[in-house]
Image (spheres, coloured by chain):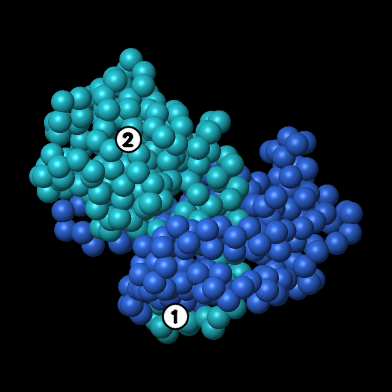
Amino acid sequence: MTEDLRNNFLRTTYCVLDNSKIMVCLRLVETSMELKPDQAVQKQDFRQILVELAKSRDKKLFMQLYDYFSPRLKSFLVRKGANEELAEELVQEALLSVWRKTSSYDPDKATASTWIFRIARNLWIDRLRKEKPDMLSPLNSYPEAGYTPSLAVCDSGRLKEAMDALPQQQAQLVYKVYYEGKSHREIAEDMDMPIGSVKSGLRLAFDKLRVRIGGGS
Amino acid sequence: MNCNHHPDDSTLFSYGAGSLPDSLAMVVACHVAVCEQCQGKVADTEQIGLGLVEQEPHQSMSSHSRDRILDMLSEPGIENSATPAAQHESEGDVPVLLRPLLGNRFSNLHWRTMAPGMKQFILPASRGKLRLLKIAPGTLLPSHGHNGSELTLVLKGSYSDELGRFCVGDVADIDPDVTHQPVADTHEGCICLIATDGPLRFKGLVPRLLQPFFQL
């Protein structure tokens, strides 16, 4: 990306920010520039699309997000244990929330995909809670704004390498958390090991994955 | 907020993945809302989650869903139906996240006495137990261990136990093999939000006998 383009992008997108925040944005833009060109453009576009959407309310633009994210969110939710119908319902609900909340999206605080993923995850947890018949009331207010940005833009290839490099048991723990949606206690029962070992295995795995994807310290 | 005690990384990892039981997730959410350090870690778990989602086949939506969402975008009122957080942001000592459930002030809740110096208020949770515990100054809780995970977040005052001193915003993420005996250590007493996903194990006979009555 040329200097001009980048400045233009920053001016239009982040015109309200002060210098320190622009530095954060620059780092984010540069992180995404390290990726393969098409990927970088894609991730950056989503960020821009969200910012644009807040102003223009352009439905066509929104449908670009929808087409990209809906199958991904659906597979995420089905993995978590939602049936086909519920998964689709939650995907629709999540993306409608995205449409409504674009004005509260802060490109300085989260990547577009993180933000959208977070909305879907919170809806899923809310839905679990609502299944209980004696619930007092639904709770839709998990923290969304005010998040510290992750400077790590996850490169799927690098993550795969990192997963492959994990000892088998740690990889299995990660798999059970992300793909099977299991709690520490359930994993301990499944794998016939103490909860303490489940937690320490996950801690180690998390550390390694964070280092490999460029987050963490 | 500067917190001294945080959820374990494995807990943040599962929280970010959406795999913590909702009772535990609520405690983590309340802590993460005020702790920048943990916000950064949760953001990392989300990036990992996205990367993992990329590595598997995506599931396409059924054919009519695209048209349906387009219709919904055009529905009148859709723009204004966002849940405004602002209505909960007035004065109060209850964390903003819990206000839809509890109102703004702890003093307005119908606390249930469990023992001298100990009151509780049970919150809804589909998996695990979630409760507020109010401990009068100087009160010593019965020594106990756990059969699953226990997460405790201090909302008011502070307490001390074998693991250290816990102040507002701090989380105790306690492994099952740990036995502890908290005591409220300031004059204002202590209010905690506690989630467990397995029954507690009390050492004394009397607490054990009372256990079923208090849903512990």
Pointer 2 or 1: first along the chain: 1
* Mark 1 crowd level (few <14, some 14–19, many ≥20, 10 Å Cα): many
Q: Chain of mark 1?
A: B
From the viewer's perspective, tell me whether residue A93 is left or right of residue A61. Answer: left
Labels 2 and 1 positioned on one and the same chain: yes
Question: Is residue B11 something one can see in this rendering?
Answer: yes
Closer to us: mark 2 or mark 1? 2
* Residue A187 seen in render: no
Residue furthest to the right: A3
Image location of residue B96, percent across then percent down: 38, 36
- Which dot marks residue B181? 2
* Residue A204, quarter of picture: bottom right
Residue at position x 56%, y 57% in the image: A203
Chain letter for the cyan part: B
Question: Residue A207 vs residue B196: left or right?
Answer: right
Residue B181 drawn at (x, y percent): 32, 35
The CA distance from mark 2 to mark 1 is 51 Å
Find out whether the residues at labels 2 and 1 contact each other: C-beta distance under 8 Å.
no
* Letter of the chain shown blue in the rendering: A
Residue at 55% over, 45% down: B38
- For the residue marked with disc 1, what is the amino acid? Met
Q: Position of residue B169 (x, y in %)?
A: 45, 33
Three-letter amino acid code at disc 2? Answer: Gln
Q: Residues within 10 Å of mark 2 (few under 14, many from 20)?
A: some
Q: Is residue A32 above or below residue A107?
A: below
- Identify the subunit bearing mark 2: B
- Which label sits on residue B61? 1
